[in-house]
Image (tube, rainbow, N blue to C red):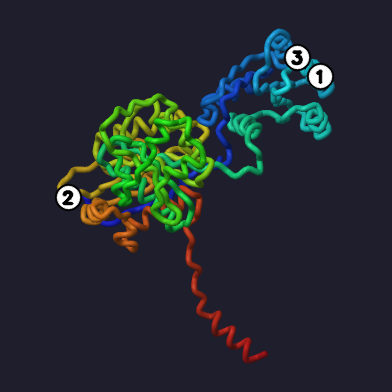
Amino acid sequence: MKLATAPTVADAPPLDGGERHIAAVPRVSIQAFCETAELAGSMQAAIGDRRMAKAHVKVQMGGLIAALEAYKNAATPNVLIIEHLGGGIDLITGLDNLASVCDAGTKVIVVGRLNDIVLYRELVRRGVSEYLVGPLSPLDLVRAISSLFNAPDAEPLGRVLAVIGAKGGVGSSTVAHNVAFAIAKDLRLNAVVADMDLPFGTTGLDFNQDPPMGIADAVFSPERVDAAYVDRLLSKCTDHLSILAAPATLDREYDFNSEAFDPILDALRGTVPYIVLDLPHLWTAWSKRALIGADDVLFVAAPDLANLRNIKNMYDFVRAARPNDRAPAYLLNQVGMPKRPEVRPADFQKALGAEPAATIPFDPQLFGTAANNGQMIAEVNASHKIAEVFVTLAKSITGRAVAKAPKRDFLSPLLAKLRGKSS
C-alpha cells in the first residue's frame, strides 16, 4: 500500500454550477399547452428540475385552441404557457380571445418560432409576460418561469453547498466547517454553517461556541422565521462567518417532514451569500430534499469498499435528480492510514466517472489538535498543505479563480533606470 504524503486537489472544473441566478419557483400552478412533442418533452424535463419542486405543473397538447376550450368554464392558473407555430395575426387574434376568459392575475408565456421584434412588442402591449423563440431546453423554461417571480435587478440568492459523508465518521463535518471557514477568512465572503445533525452535531464544538439558540429553534417554530429572527439565531464566529448550531441534546425526537427545513433555508438564501449545510449521514425525506435542493453537492468518503459503494449510489442518485446542474463533487479523506488496506483513488474515479476534487491524507495529530481546541486547520497551522486544500476548494465552490503571482521581469528595473538617464 502506498501512503499519501501530501494532499492533492484535482485540476477539475469549479464545483459551482453555471446557473447562479435562477431562483426557485414559488408554490404556483402552471399549465402548458404545447403544439410540438419537443416542447412537451422539455416541459416534462423542467418539472424535474430542483428549482421547480414547489410548483404544480400540468402539460397537455393542443396549443392555443386547446387553451381557449379549457378555460371557457375553468379558472386559469398562475402561469399559462402557450405554444403557437402559426402566423403572428393568428396568434394575436387567439390571445385576444383568450384574454376574455383569462384571470387578471395569470402570467402568460408564449412560445413561437417567429423571431420578430414587432410581434414581441405587440404581445407585451397586450400583457403577455414573455415571448420565447423555440426550440427551448428545460433550463430555458425554468429560467423564464423563475424570472416572472424574481426581479432581474434583485440581489442574487445565497448559494447553498451541501456536504455529506458516504459513511459516518469520514470527516464530512470537519470538511464542511473548514471550507466555510476558508470562504469567510480567505475570500472575505459572508458565510453560514447550518448544522443539520440536530441530536449529534459538532459545529458548536468545532468553532468553540455554545450559543443559546440555533437551527432547532427555527425548525420547531417555522412561523417565526424571517430575516430578523434568523439574525438572532446566528452565532458569530469571525467577521464573515456565523453558525447555526445544533442543540446536540436527546430530550426530544427529531422526526421531520420533508419540508421542515425549507423556511430557515429560504430565509438564509435571502440574507447570506454562501450557506454550507453540514448534513448528517442519514437518508430521510428532509435530508434528500436538502441534498437535491442545494446548488452544489460535495461528498466526503474514506478509501474503503463500503464508502465506494455508498458514494456510487449517492452520486448516481443526486446526478439523476439534478439533471440541469453540474455533477456533484467528492473528495477522499483520511487517505494513507497506516496498516489499513485502501481502495485506490483510481477505483473511485473509474466507478464515478470523475476525479476527486481533493485527496486529504490521514493526519490524526493535526485534525485531533484542531478538534480538541475548537479550531479550524488554518488556525492550528495556516501554512499546512491541508489548509491550502480547503482554500482551493473554497475558491472553486465560489467561482473565485486561484490567483497566480505574476512572473518577475528582471529587465524592467534596469530598463526603467536607462530611460531615466536618457530623459
Give SS at disc 1.
Answer: helix
Vertical placement of 20 versus 56: above or below? below
Q: CA distance from mark 1 to mark 3?
A: 10 Å
The answer to whether residue 317 of the structure is visible from this angle is: no
Q: Residues within 10 Å of mark 3 (few under 14, many from 20)?
A: some
What residue is disc 3 on?
Answer: 101
Q: Amino acid at mark 2?
A: Pro
In the foreground, 346 or 420? 420
Give SS at disc 3.
Answer: loop
Q: Which mark is residue 338?
A: 2
Nearer mark to the viewer, of 1 and 2: 1
Q: Amino acid at mark 3?
A: Val
Q: Position of residue 338 (x, y in %)?
A: 17, 50
Q: Position of residue 204 (x, y in %)?
A: 32, 46
Q: Position of residue 165 (x, y in %)?
A: 32, 38
Of the residues under marks 1 and 3, which one precedes in the sequence? Answer: 1
Q: Residues within 10 Å of mark 2 (few under 14, many from 20)?
A: few
Of the residues under marks 1 and 2, which one precedes in the sequence? Answer: 1
Quadrant occupied by the C terminus: bottom right
Q: CA distance from mark 2 to mark 3?
A: 74 Å
Q: Amino acid at mark 1?
A: Asp
Q: CA distance from mark 1 to mark 2?
A: 76 Å
The structure residue drawn at horizontal position 58% and vertical position 43%, both measured from the top left corner, is 156
Left or right of 31 in this view: 110 = right
What residue is disc 1 on?
Answer: 96
In the foreground, 4 or 402? 402
